[in-house]
Amino acid sequence: MLIKSPQNQTFKNLLKLQDKKFRFQNDVFLVEGKKQVVELPKNWNIKQIIVSQKYEDIKDFEDAIILSERLFAKLSSTKSPQGIIAVVEKKHYKIEELLKQTGFFIVLENIQDPGNIGTIIRSADAFGAKAIFISQGSADMYSDKTVRSTMGSLFHLPVVDDVDMEELLYFMKKEKFTVFVASLKGSKHINDLKIPNKSVFIIGNESKGIKQETEKSADVLFKIPMYGKAESLNAAIAASIIMYETVKNK
C-alpha cells in the first residue's frame, strides 16, 4: 500500500505516534533505522513496518506501509532518514518480580535529558545491570531521541518507566536490597564500597541531584571522587563510572 496524501488516515495515525500521549494510548513506540529495526529481538512484537517508497530492501517487507519520500520525511525524526520505521509494542514488567533477582539495579530519578537516559541504558546493558527503573517526572523513555541513543540496548534488559519512587523503594526494602544513593553529601567513595549481591544505585537529576525524601531512604550515600575543578559529572558519565566500579572486582 503506497500512501502519497498527507490526508490519508493511516498516515495521520502514524504521525500522531510522534506525540507521547498517543504512544501511551496505543501502548506502542517508534523505532527508526535499518540496523535497529532488523536487529529487533523476536520476543518484541512489531505491530507495523513503514518504509519509504525508495527503500532499497522494500521486497523484504511484504506487509509494510509504503510512504512517499515526502511523507516519510515528515514521519522520520532524523535529518537523513534511512527509510524504515517499526511500530513496536511496549513491554511491561512487574517491579516485584524483577526484584526477585540478585544483582545490581539502576534507578534514575527525574533525569531530564533523553540522551542521558539512552546512554545510561546502553551502559547498563554493557555492565550487566538486571533492570533500570525510571521515575515519574523523567524524560520520555519512548521519545525518538531516547530510543535512538540506547543503540538497541533498550531491547536487551528490562526498563520500567513512570515509576513511583515511594512504591519502588518499598519493594526494594522488602526484598532486602542495599540502597546506594549518589550524592555530594556522601562520605564514601564509589571505589571504596562493599557491594552486596542485591544492590540498587539511585542517580538523580542533572542539576538538582536527588530528592530529599529519596536521600533519606538510602543505606549508603556515596560520591565519585573528582580531582579537577568541575563541580559535577554528567549523569550518564557518572552512572557509567558507578556501574564499572560495581562489576570491576566481581
Image (spheres, grey):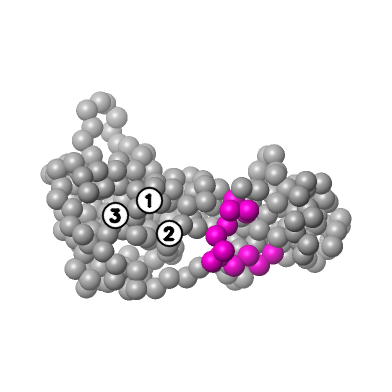
Residue 161 appears in the picture as rendered: yes
Sooner in the amino-acid sequence: mark 2 or mark 3: 2
| Residue 131 painted magenta | no
Q: Is residue 57 left or right of residue 220?
A: right
Q: Is residue 122 left or right of residue 182?
A: right
Q: Position of residue 55 (x, y in %)?
A: 77, 48
Q: Amino acid at mark 2?
A: Leu
Sooner in the amino-acid sequence: mark 1 or mark 3: 1
What is the CA distance from the residue labelled 1 to the residue labelled 2? Answer: 8 Å
Q: Position of residue 123 (x, y in %)?
A: 39, 46
Sooner in the amino-acid sequence: mark 1 or mark 2: 1
Asked if the residue under mark 2 is in contact with the one under mark 1, i.e. CB atoms within 8 Å, the reply is yes
Q: Which residue is mark 2?
A: 157
Q: Amino acid at mark 1?
A: Ala
Q: For numbered disc 1, what is the local secondary structure?
A: helix
Asked if the residue under mark 3 is in contact with the one under mark 2, i.e. CB atoms within 8 Å, the reply is no
Q: Which residue is mark 3?
A: 202
User: Which quadrant of the rendered structure holds the N terminus?
Assistant: bottom right
Q: Which residue is mark 1?
A: 124
Q: For numbered disc 2, what is the local secondary structure?
A: loop
Mark 2 residue crowding within 10 angstroms, few (<14) / some (14–19) / many (20+): some
